[in-house]
Structure formats: structure tokens, C-alpha cells
Image (cartoon, rainbow, N blue to C red):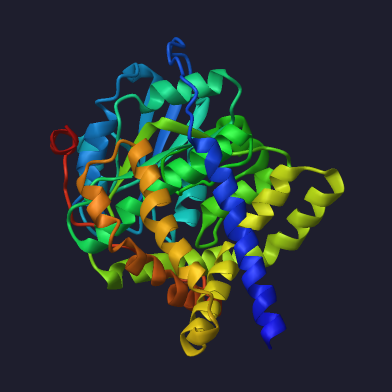
């Protein structure tokens, strides 16, 4: 038994050290010049199910971008809506695509339907930008995506931020987690030339990529499935650190639990279908991008192993090396604090870091629940009620 526990601890330590090593490459940011003349035409696609409370402010923020208005068009896929989502979107200047399907429900199906409709239009778009209905975006978003497309990048993920970080201890913890992930993981992977993770929103995908591969992603984490399938073909997800998407985060643990369990259900499902094939292909072709992508697919399983190790430590505390606790303390409050410092986070976020560990521990039971229900593809809709404007958000940031 001791040998098994030691092997598991060693595996967890190697996994942790691997990501710490990757994070070192986020300490420096290469300066970028976004002076590329506007040229790319964008289809901004928003999948929305009963989002009358928030859809208006998102569309307003999109129409305030510092990118030529004639070079982008906003599409709202009103998916099984029974409220005023379609009417509000249309009144604000968006092109509404209505979809009604009682069997195939969820964002993945809605996007597939919308992409097919847009591909059939006479107007050509160079790229598709996918947003969630509760988002707001920075004015330079399309300017940066235009620059990256001109550099030859095909799949680009924008910076994921939070538009309501101060609402509750849950939203504060999520905000801290996103700052750490954006800096220590996404930016680091981009600097290393590895594939970054698609976040489901703030994604820019070249039209020729969508035409070649199709979307066809109907799992609960269609973004993860898409990035995995394109990685098989040698295409990586790039990271745009200055193109910011502000996302509304859950206020309560119950809401957050449901959302994260859906993510873990989808993640475990995709891992079960693609891990071995991706890892094997990475080894055979000596493509470390694919090996790293396969390692990422295993993340929920390492979380569950960590939970088992934690339970073992509680019941066998006398066998646990105290240096593990000391090292964990230093890592939590000094090293993760470094990410907040590098991101120039407000001073109050360093206080929020004190209870962030409590939130991270909830990932363990959530991941177990996600693994158990990994084959359940029933979409769980997150209700949004905060109609925060881009002007209000800017006043809070300044």
C-alpha cells in the first residue's frame, strides 16, 4: 500500500512540476504592434438561449469596437428562445438566426446550425469570432484578431476576464483563478509554441479551418473537442493576451458547481475518446505539442488523484512529511501571488487569494461527479441576470 501511495505522490509531483516549469515562460511578454491595417472580415457569432437580460449590453459593446463597422457583422443564434432575446438583438442591429430543436439542445448544436447558415450567405467572412451572450469585449478585440490572422494564425483565444469579480466570494475566487491561468498557463504555452486552451468564448477561428474541419462539436465541452481534433492535424490554438473578453461568473457555489460539473463531464468524455490516440500519435511523430495536449486531457484524473491523496493524508497525517505543507503554503501565497503581480491585479485581489484555496478544493468532488456522469450530454443552462454595461465596466477598472 505504501508503495502505491508513494507512486501516486510521485506522479502528482511530476505533474505539478511540469506545469510550474511551463509557467516560468510567462514571466516575459513579447511586445506586439497591432498596426496591421484592417482587412479581415469577421462574423461575430453569439449563441443565446433566453438571454434577454444580458444580450443587449454585449451587442452594444461589439458595435463600439475600434474596427471598421463594414468589416464585421453580428449574428445572434436565438436557440430555443421563449423570451425577448431575438427581438432585442434584432433591434440593436444584429442578424438573428432562430433555431428550434427539442432534441438537440446546447451551445454546440446551436453553433453548428449557425455556422452552416452563415457559410451559406453570399458574403464572405475571413474568420468567425464566438462569444457568449453574457460577455463584454474590449474595443481592440477585432483589431488584434485581424493582426494575428495577418500573421498566419488560424485559431486564436482571447484573454478571459471577469465582469463581476466583486459580487461574492465565489466570483472573486473565479477571478483570481482566471488571472493565474491566463498568465501562468495560457501565455506561457503560447510563448513556448504549445497549443493553448479554447475557453468556449472569445475564440477566433479562420473560416477556411471551419470549412475544412466543420464544427460538429456537440459535447458539453465543444471547445476542448475542437482544439483536440485540430491538434491531430498539427494546428495549435494561439493566445491573444490583449484581446479581452469579460465573462459573467456565478455568484453562488450551487451555480458554480453545476457549471463546473458540466465542464468536467465534457472534459472526461473527450479525454476518454481522444487521450490514447493523441498521446500515441505525439510519440510516433515526436510532436510534443500533441503530447502536451494529451497531458492536458488528463487534468481531471490528476485532480481526482490529488483528492485521494488528500483523504489518505488526513487519515494518516503522522506519515505525511511536514515539508509538503510548508511547500504548499509558499506556493499558494507567494508563487501564485506572483501571477497577480505580473497581471497588475488590484491590491484587493491579493486578499482574495487567502480564501482561493477553499474554492480550489471544491474542484475535487466536482471532478469526481463529472467523471461519474461523463457520458451524460444533457446541457445545463447557466442563467444570467447582470446587465452590466461596457461603460460601467470601464469605470470599475479605472
In the image, what residue occupies the spot 61% across and 22% down? 152
| Residue 102 visible within the image | no
Residue 185: percent from the left, percent from the top? Answer: 51, 45
Q: Is residue 68 above or below residue 377?
A: above
In the displayed structure, does residue 180 sit left or right of residue 191? left
Residue 271: percent from the left, percent from the top? Answer: 64, 63
In the displayed structure, does residue 275 sit left or right of residue 283? left
Q: Nearer the viewer, residue 238 or 189?
A: 189
Disc tally is 0
Q: Nearer the viewer, residue 214 or 292?
A: 292
In the image, what residue occupies the spot 33% across and 43% down? 161
Residue 249: percent from the left, percent from the top? Answer: 28, 56
Q: Nearer the viewer, residue 261 or 114?
A: 261
Residue 132: percent from the left, percent from the top? Answer: 35, 47
Q: Is residue 217 above or below residue 355?
A: above
In the image, what residue occupies the spot 57% across and 40% down? 189
| Residue 386 visible within the image | yes
Which image quarter is the C terminus in?
Answer: top left
Residue 173 found in image quarter: bottom left
* Most distant residue in the right direction: 284
Q: Nearer the viewer, residue 295 or 307?
A: 307
Which image quarter is the N terminus in?
Answer: bottom right
Amino acid at each position: 500500500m505504501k508503495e502505491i501511495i508513494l507512486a501516486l505522490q510521485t506522479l502528482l509531483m511530476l505533474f505539478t512540476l511540469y506545469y510550474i516549469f511551463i509557467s516560468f515562460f510567462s514571466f516575459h511578454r513579447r511586445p506586439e504592434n497591432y498596426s496591421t491595417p484592417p482587412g479581415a472580415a469577421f462574423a461575430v457569432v453569439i449563441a443565446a438561449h433566453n438571454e434577454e437580460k444580458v444580450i443587449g449590453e454585449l451587442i452594444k459593446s461589439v458595435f463600439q469596437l475600434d474596427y471598421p463597422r463594414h468589416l464585421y457583422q453580428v449574428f445572434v443564434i436565438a436557440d430555443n428562445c421563449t423570451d425577448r432575446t431575438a427581438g432585442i438583438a434584432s433591434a440593436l442591429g444584429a442578424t438573428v438566426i432562430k433555431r428550434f430543436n427539442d432534441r438537440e439542445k446546447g451551445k454546440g448544436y446551436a453553433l453548428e446550425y449557425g455556422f452552416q447558415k452563415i457559410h451559406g450567405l453570399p458574403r464572405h467572412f475571413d474568420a468567425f469570432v464566438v462569444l457568449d451572450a453574457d460577455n463584454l469585449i474590449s474595443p481592440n478585440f477585432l483589431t488584434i484578431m485581424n493582426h494575428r490572422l495577418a500573421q498566419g494564425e488560424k485559431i486564436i483565444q482571447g484573454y478571459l476576464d471577469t465582469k463581476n469579480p466583486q459580487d461574492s466570494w465565489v466570483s472573486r475566487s473565479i477571478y483570481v483563478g482566471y488571472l493565474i491561468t491566463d498568465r501562468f498557463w495560457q501565455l506561457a504555452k503560447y510563448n513556448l509554441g504549445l497549443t493553448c486552451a479554447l475557453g468556449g468564448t472569445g475564440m477566433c477561428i479562420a473560416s477556411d479551418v471551419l470549412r475544412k474541419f466543420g464544427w460538429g462539436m456537440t459535447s458539453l465541452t465543444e471547445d476542448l473537442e475542437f482544439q483536440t481534433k485540430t491538434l491531430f492535424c498539427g494546428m495549435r490554438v494561439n493566445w491573444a493576451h490583449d484581446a479581452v473578453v469579460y465573462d459573467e461568473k456565478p455568484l453562488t457555489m450551487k451555480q458554480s458547481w453545476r457549471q463546473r460539473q458540466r465542464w468536467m463531464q465534457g472534459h472526461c468524455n473527450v479525454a476518454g475518446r481522444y487521450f490514447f490516440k493523441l498521446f500515441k500519435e505525439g510519440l510516433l511523430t515526436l510532436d510534443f505539442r500533441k503530447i502536451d495536449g494529451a497531458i492536458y486531457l488528463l487534468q481531471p484524473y490528476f485532480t481526482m488523484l490529488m483528492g485521494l491523496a488528500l483523504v489518505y493524508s488526513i487519515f494518516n497525517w503522522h506519515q505525511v512529511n511536514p515539508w509538503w505543507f510548508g511547500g504548499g503554503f509558499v506556493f499558494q501565497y507567494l508563487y501564485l501571488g506572483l501571477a497577480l503581480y505580473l497581471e497588475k491585479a488590484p491590491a484587493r485581489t491579493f486578499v482574495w487569494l487567502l480564501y482561493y484555496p477553499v474554492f480550489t478544493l471544491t474542484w475535487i468532488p466536482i471532478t469526481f461527479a463529472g467523471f461519474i456522469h461523463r457520458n451524460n450530454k444533457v446541457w445545463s443552462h447557466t442563467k444570467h441576470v447582470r446587465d452590466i454595461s461596457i461603460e460601467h465596466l470601464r469605470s470599475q477598472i479605472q
